[in-house]
Amino acid sequence: MEAKIGKFFDSVGSFFSGGDQIPWCDRDIIVGCEREVAEAGDSDERKSDSIMRLSWALVHSRQPEDVQRGIAMLEDSLVNNTSSPLQQREKLYLLAIGYYRSGAYSRSRQLVEQCLEIAPDWRQALTLKKAIEDKIAKDGVIGIGITATAVGLIAGGIAAALARKK
């Protein structure tokens, strides 16, 4: 019985929280990735791989400051871009995740579009694009609902005031 109640609350919670399929990352994984970067030494390839894993962990974190740190790292690596198209696609995708997590949906959508220019059939990018579009649509519906409620309350207040005068 408790399992069914838990599933119900999870499904209701996923509706209100967005319910995307993008994974989260715990703090202990981030710490492990930071340690790996520190221990990478002088090997450029090893350090680059470690930084990509750390960037992945940061943009998938539940902590906004970690997400912002991941965004900054990825943007810096794109400015100094000496990577292959595949690596650039990965960085753009992770950056899109970071912006999605921070609520900058239009920027996230732009980055996903760039990913899809490089790899049009990439399933992860297509899934993220759908999640972004769903989130934008949901936010729009909520905004319209709030506006309609406010207009209804104002109209009701005016109608009540007029009824009281008579």
Image (cartoon, grey):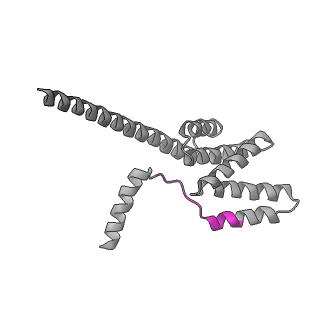
Residue 19 percent location from the top left of the image = 44, 53
Q: Locate the C terminus by quadrant.
A: top left
Residue 104 visible within the image:
yes
Vertical relation: 112 (above or below) 37: above
Q: Locate the N terminus by quadrant.
A: bottom left
Residue occupying the point 73% across, 62% down: 34
Residue 151 percent location from the top left of the image = 30, 31
In the picture, residue 12 is in which quadrant?
Answer: bottom left
**Residue 31 in magenta?**
yes
Outermost right residue? 42
Vertical relation: 27 (above or below) 1: above
Nearest the viewer among 109 and 17 is 17
Residue 165 percent location from the top left of the image = 14, 27
Outermost bottom residue? 1
Outermost front residue? 165
Residue occupying the point 66% across, 38% down: 118
In the picture, residue 139 is in which quadrant?
Answer: top left
Residue occupying the point 62% across, 38% down: 111
Q: Which residues are magenta?
A: 20-32
Residue 158 percent location from the top left of the image = 23, 29
Residue 84 visible within the image:
no
Nearest the viewer among 86 and 136 is 136
Vertical relation: 49 (above or below) 36: above
122 horizontally vs 82: left or right: left
Q: How many marks?
A: 0
In the picture, residue 144 is in which quadrant?
Answer: top left
**Residue 81 in magenta?**
no
